Image: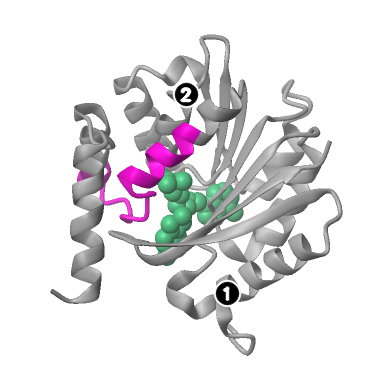
Amino acid sequence: MEEHETWEALDQYFSEKLHAFDPVMDWVLEANEKAELPPIDVAPNQGKFLYLLAKLKGVKTILEIGTLGGYSSIWMARALPDDGRLVTLEFSEKHAAVAQSNMKKAGVDGKIDVIIGPALETLPTLKDKGFSSFDMIFIDADKPNNPHYLEWALKLSTPGTLIVGDNVVRNGNVLNKESDDPSIKGIRQFIHLLSEEPRIESTAIQTVGIKGYDGFVVGVVKK
Ligand code: SAH
Ligand code: DHB
Ligand code: MG
């Protein structure tokens, strides 16, 4: 087997054995495919990982930047208590509509607000909407804006807030200092800002699997 085939087979094995698949989540991925959304949702075992992080911290409020079809949103919303709330920001009306239908089907629509528009325009409206801080923030939208999203994550956090960023490895391309790809530059600047940020303790973990070779950055706002 080629290396990437082994990664994929193991993702399948772990996701089956450790219950990262279930009929509702599978249905969401099918609905996304039918609507021709790009297949860039987190993997099932990564979705469950986000769910477990949220449970571990007992979070009550979650902010997600980048909804797509709501696959990661639904995983995280499932970890919320009855009075918990997840706010997710999405630029595309089409993606948001698919996500809202998926959230309804999954029975978590009552806990989620999908806010449509470019995140840099909707983030400044959250305070007035009654969301002044979040216990967990998942950054997974347009990577060139990651440095700005980090700034907003700090504004919308309190001591102990968990910040997770997706796609910080990109098949190793993030190592390329000379890259002129705006996504790579955005991720490198994001990591650089974290390295100099006294208010957050962070680390990054590389991952392999059905999403190829990628990784997460995880940080906690200091007490
Ligand atoms: N978190 C999702 C995947 C998100 S993909 C999951 O794992 O299931 C990234 C999403 O960010 C796409 O739907 C894209 O339309 C959205 N996006 C891109 N630029 C954006 C912006 N400026 N503001 C808000 N959303 C944006
Ligand atoms: C892309 C974006 C993602 O958030 C992801 O998880 C994978 C790929 C992309 O834009 O290519
Ligand atoms: Mg992603």
Residue 93's label in the rendered image is none
The residue positioned 64% from the left and 86% from the top of the image is 177
Q: Position of residue 10 (x, y in %)?
A: 22, 56
Q: Amino acid at mark 1?
A: Ile
Say whether disc 2 or disc 1 marks the residue closer to the N-terminus. Answer: 2
Question: What residue sits 20% from the left and 39% below the top?
Answer: 17
Name the residue carrying label 1. 184
If the image is split into quadrants, where does the N terminus sit?
Answer: bottom left
Residue sitting at x 47%, y 42%: 67
Look at the numbered disc 1 and say if its residue's Cβ is closer than 8 Å to ligand 2.
Answer: no
In this rendering, position of residue 208 left or right of residue 134: left
Is residue 41 on the magenta stretch? yes
Q: Is residue 214 toward the left or the right of residue 29 in the image?
A: right
The magenta segment is 32-52
Q: Quadrant of the C terminus?
A: top right
Up-down: is 104 above or below 178? above
Q: Position of residue 219 (x, y in %)?
A: 67, 48
The furthest residue to the bottom: 178
Residue 137, by quadrant, is top right
